[in-house]
C-alpha cells in the first residue's frame, strides 16, 4: 500500500527509496530493536560452528533468545535457514548464555531462559511468494518482516502474516532435524490457553475478548503464560488474560495516579514476578464482573495509547 503525505486538500505520494544494503538495514534495526520489536539487543555478528548470526537479541517478556537475520537474496529457504539457526542455539545453549552475560549489564542463569520460546526473525526488502507460503504452518517459530525505506527519512517494518492453518510442519516434513527442533521449541495459540480454563472461564473469556477487540486497533498475542492485547503494531501489553478453572486473572499496565478503581479490585503485581512496575492485577469470576473489568481495561488502553 503506497504512503501519502497530506498537503491541505491533496495527497502527495511518498516515493520509495532504492533498496538499502543489508548492513544499512542491520545497523538501523540493531540501534532500534527495542523500539521496533520490544527486544533487548545482545550482540552483532555472533559466529559459532561455521554459522554467523547477524543479530542476537533477548525477549524479556518470554525470557527467550531471538535471532535476527537480514536478507536481500530472494532464493534462500526460510525454513531450512530458520531451523538451522534454532538448532545451532539449542545444541549450544552454554555459548549463547555466555554471549548474553558478556554483553549485558546484568547476568542471567541458564535455568531462567525459556528455550522453548526461541524464534528467528528474517528482515528483507522483499519476500517471494514461495517464501511467504513457506511460513503457512501452525505455530511456526519463524517470522518474516519486510522493511521499506521512503523519502523524508520514513522507514516501515511490516510483518508478513501467515495464513491460518491447522497443519504443523512436523507432521509433513521428513526431516528428523526439524522434528527434533520442534520438540523443544514451542509456540502457542488460543486453543492452548482455552484448554487451561473450564467451560465457565472460556465463556467469560469470549464475552470479554469481544469487548476488548472492539475498543480500537487491537492485536491479540499468544504467549506461554497468557493471552496479551496490544495497540496496533506495538509490543506492550495494555492488558493480558490468564486462564484458570474458576477465574480469569487480568493484569493491566497503568500507574496508580492514572487509575480510577472505586471498587478497589486491583492490586499491585508482586515485585518477585519481575514484571513492569506499573502492572496491576484483578480477577473476574462471573459475567456481572465484565462491565467493571472493561472499564479498568479501557483506562489502561487510553494510558498506553498515548505513550
Image: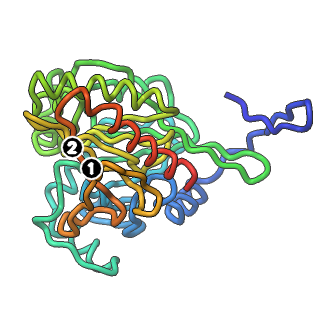
Query: Residue drawn 58% across and 41% down?
Result: 125
For the residues labelled 1 and 2, say whether their Cβ atoms are less than 8 Å apart: yes
Q: Residues within 10 Å of mark 2 (few under 14, many from 20)?
A: some
Q: Quadrant of the C terminus?
A: bottom right
In the rendered image, residue 213, in percent from the top left (x then y), is placed at 42, 29
Residue at the image point whose x is 9% and y is 27% from the top: 198
Q: Quadrant of the N terminus?
A: top right
Task: Tell me where residue 38 sits by quadrant.
Answer: bottom left
Q: Circle 1 sits in a helix, a strand or a loop, which is it?
A: loop
Query: Where on the picture, by quarter, is residue 178?
Result: top left
Percent x, y of residue 280: 30, 56
Q: Which mark is residue 174?
A: none
Q: Secondary structure at mark 2?
A: strand
Q: Nearer the viewer, residue 122 or 63?
A: 63
What residue occupies the far front of the structure in this picture?
Answer: 262
Q: Is residue 243 left or right of residue 250?
A: left
* Colour pattern: rainbow
Label 1 to label 2: alpha-carbon separation = 8 Å
Give the x, y percent position of residue 42.
37, 69
> Who comes first in sequence, dot 1 or dot 2?
1
The correct choice, above or below, for 6 with respect to 34 in the image is: above
The total of numbered circles placed on residues is: 2
Q: Which residue is mark 1?
A: 265
Of badges 1 and 2, nearer the viewer stands: 1
- Residue visible at 14% across and 37% down? 247
In screen coordinates, is 236 left or right of 207?
A: right
Within 10 Å of the Cα at label 1, are there few (<14), some (14-19), or many (20+) other Cα atoms?
some
Residue at x 26% of width, y 44% of height = 250
According to the image, label 2 marks what residue? 283
Task: Answer with the quarter of the image where residue 173 lies.
Answer: top left
Q: Describe residue 223's horizontal placement relative to residue 212 as left or right.
A: left
Q: Give how far across and how far down residue 208 sits, in percent.
A: 31, 29
Amino acid at each position: 500500500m503506497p504512503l501519502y503525505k497530506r498537503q491541505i486538500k491533496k495527497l502527495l505520494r511518498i516515493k520509495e527509496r532504492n533498496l538499502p544494503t543489508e548492513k544499512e538495514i542491520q545497523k538501523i534495526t540493531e540501534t532500534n530493536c527495542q523500539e521496533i520489536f520490544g527486544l533487548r539487543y545482545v550482540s552483532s555478528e555472533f559466529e559459532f560452528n561455521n554459522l554467523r548470526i547477524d543479530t542476537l537479541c533477548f525477549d524479556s517478556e518470554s525470557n527467550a533468545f531471538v535471532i535476527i537475520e537480514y536478507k536481500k537474496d530472494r532464493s534462500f529457504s526460510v525454513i531450512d535457514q530458520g531451523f538451522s539457526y534454532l538448532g545451532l542455539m539449542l545444541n549450544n545453549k552454554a555459548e549463547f548464555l555466555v554471549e548474553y552475560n558478556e554483553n549485558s549489564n546484568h547476568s542471567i542463569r541458564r535455568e531462567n531462559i525459556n528455550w522453548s520460546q526461541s524464534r528467528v526473525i528474517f528482515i528483507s526488502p522483499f519476500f517471494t511468494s514461495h517464501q511467504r507460503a513457506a511460513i503457512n504452518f501452525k505455530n511456526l517459530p519463524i517470522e518474516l518482516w519486510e522493511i521499506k525505506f521512503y523519502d523524508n527519512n520514513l522507514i516501515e517494518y511490516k510483518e508478513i502474516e501467515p495464513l491460518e492453518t491447522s497443519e504443523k510442519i512436523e507432521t509433513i516434513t521428513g526431516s528428523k532435524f526439524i522434528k527434533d527442533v520442534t520438540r523443544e521449541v514451542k509456540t502457542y495459540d488460543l486453543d492452548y490457553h482455552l484448554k487451561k480454563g473450564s467451560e465457565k472461564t472460556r465463556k467469560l473469556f469470549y464475552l470479554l475478548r469481544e469487548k476488548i477487540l472492539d475498543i480500537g486497533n487491537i492485536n491479540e498475542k499468544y504467549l506461554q503464560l497468557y493471552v496479551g492485547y496490544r495497540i496496533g503494531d506495538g509490543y506492550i501489553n495494555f492488558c493480558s488474560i490468564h486462564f484458570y478453572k474458576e477465574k480469569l486473572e487480568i493484569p493491566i499496565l497503568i500507574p496508580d495516579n492514572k487509575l480510577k478503581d472505586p471498587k478497589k479490585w486491583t492490586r499491585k503485581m508482586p515485585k518477585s514476578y519481575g514484571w513492569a512496575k506499573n502492572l496491576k492485577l484483578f480477577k473476574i469470576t462471573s459475567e456481572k464482573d465484565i462491565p467493571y473489568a472493561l472499564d479498568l481495561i479501557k483506562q489502561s488502553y487510553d494510558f498506553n495509547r498515548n505513550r
